[in-house]
Image (cartoon, rainbow, N blue to C red):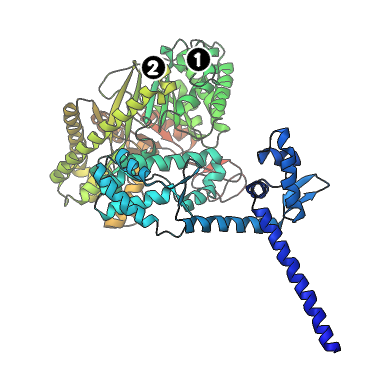
Amino acid sequence: METESLDYSQSARKGGVLESASKRVRMIFSVMASPNRIDILRILNTKGPLTYSELKALAGFKSKKESGKFAYHLRKLLRQLLVALNKAERRYTITNLGKLVLSLARQIEERSIIESGKMYVRTSNHTIEEFNSHKIIQSLVREASLPLEQAQKITEEVENKIYKFQTAYLTSSLIRETVNSVLIEHGHEEYRNKLARVGLPVSDIAGMLASEDATRNGAQGVMGRTADAVFSEYFVFNTLPKDIADMHLAGEINIASSGTWGLLPDTIFVDLSELDSFDLQGRFPAVARLASLKGADDMLTALPVLIPLLACEASAEVVLEGVAPALAKSKDADDLASRFGRALVASSASGPGPATTIAVPQETDARQVNALLDGYKKYVDVTPLPRIGLSLGALKKESADHVAAAVRAGGIVTIGSGRAASGIRKAAGGKNPAAAMTLHSLSINLPRLAYESNRDETYFRAKLALAIKPSLAASAMRKKLVLENAKRGMLPAFSAATQSLQRATTGVIVNLTGAHEAVYSILGHDAAHGGTEVMQKVLKTAVEVAQSQAKQLGDDAAVSMVADGSGARFATIDSDKYGRVSLSQSQNITSYSQGMTLSGKELLSKGSGLARECSAIDKLLNGGLAATIDVTDLSAADVKSAIESASELAFSRPRFALAVCATCGKKSKASADKCESCKSPHRLA
């Protein structure tokens, strides 16, 4: 009997526990029956601990009349231990049980949606809407220009696929992917391309956020790279003809600035002496109006405003003319050097961007030139990777030491009139406009043409002529896009400086990459035995074909050999296709040549022979030539001598290669294994 009594009491207790738990579950389900209480749980789960007034406002109980209703709902949640109050902080938080209930409510909601047969869409506008197949029809007709009858058939097939998905919520991207897959199945690739979503995979964005570049350039740099990737995909696949896009993807041509292809010109030239004032007329309300740009004080005040503004409106370089004449009015050279250096430092505070070049006319007094060079060196000394350079119209004998000092410090100093620091000419056709924009980021892969010519120079030149025609056609299309966007207000600073583009011209330039490798290494011509003449014949052919094709397009066109980053891409693609190209048995090419690089040592030892060859090529190329003088391994005295020897060239840029330490930011010789200051092996560039 005692055993029976014990079993009965244990059973009674167990039954009581079960009954109590069942009652608790019923109470929790009664709490879930109110949308207001579920909303309160969602708010606390999303926002974290909140005060009574904060929670009340977020839950939508804003009037005094609703205070009692809110208190009732909150009390219910507290009694069932779904919400807890931290009495010390007077803040409410969701409990673990509350999170479990919220998760259960979400699952019930999603399952009920599935059972009801309804589908909901999480849209790109951050809303949830019931699925509506008519919107697919509208997109197919409006965005892809699909005939209505076909759009209805495609939509019916898409709808059948969607209702087979085991998900409560669709997304805009998932629907679009499904539509595109059906279009491909039916052979409608052209319509699919128009409907394609432009964007980045999640893994790419995560990788970008974790990259060294993100650490170096910050959030703005990451957003800039993201925008560049999105616009690059858009311009290559949606604005270029398919044959041009295929040439780019195959490595026959390269579009260096694909992310800004239809938005920005590559290089802009602006003569500030033509401006009495600068006013954006409210386009950027936070940017000051510049009442005058005539005196030295006005110009030094204007530079930190104008340089960042104009740098946003070019993908490669901004060339400012008219700065030096205004600064030349300053009487005190030492004061000018100091203030000019400070102005350049202030101008570079906006972060990375295209290069900016300040042109110094040939007629500028040597004393003033030296003051500008000294001020420029002050800027270079405190800037690890300077993006501002000086362009001297001519080298004055009294300035050679100052130029050498700026170059050895890592500065960008070029010598030549009417050129950007890249070597691009301001006016290809001999005109001299007040302002100009040039489009020159499309390059032709000459080594590829040489590979496909079977070492036949005539065939090579014929293939070059054929490549120039579609390249110019693509550039002409780009010019139209850029000008249309400029007229819409996409280039406000340049438009303000050129009176709404009325005083500006636009030049189209096709760039040639790998000429040296094509003629000498692949076609096999020897520079000492007729190779130079073959090179000149090739370039002459390119210029003549470009000018002839330009007349048919009703436009101006030119040919250049400048650096735009295409050389490395072409060499990588061709090495995979043809194997490594060798200049000799011991030297492999990792990047094709762009422009000409002259050794400072050879220039000093061989005299003017190299200079004459370079000058002959420069005269042929009406779009510009980048002639770099490598003075890295020269002493200070020899750097000066090499710069003086190169002064007979129409354009030259002496370059002293330095590496920037990623640890301390100091500069060391590029050949050094470690930073000369902190001994770190890590480099930025």
Q: Secondary structure at mark 2?
A: loop
- Whether residue 602 is visible, yes or no, is no
Q: Which mark is residue 412?
A: none
Q: Secondary structure at mark 1?
A: helix
Residue drawn at (73%, 33%) of the image: 64
Q: Vertically, is 252 above or below 409?
A: below
Question: Observer-nearest residue: 499 or 230?
Answer: 230
- Count numbered badges in the picture: 2
| Farthest-out residue, front | 1
- Rendering coords of residue 178 (x, y %): 36, 53
Q: Vertically, is 344 above or below 187?
A: above
Residue drawn at (81%, 87%) of the image: 4
- Rendering coords of residue 225 (x, y %): 46, 41
Which amino acid lies under the numbered mark 1 shown in the image of this protein?
A: Leu
**C-beta proximity under 8 Å, tags 1 and 2:** no
Q: Vertically, is 537 above or below 647?
A: below
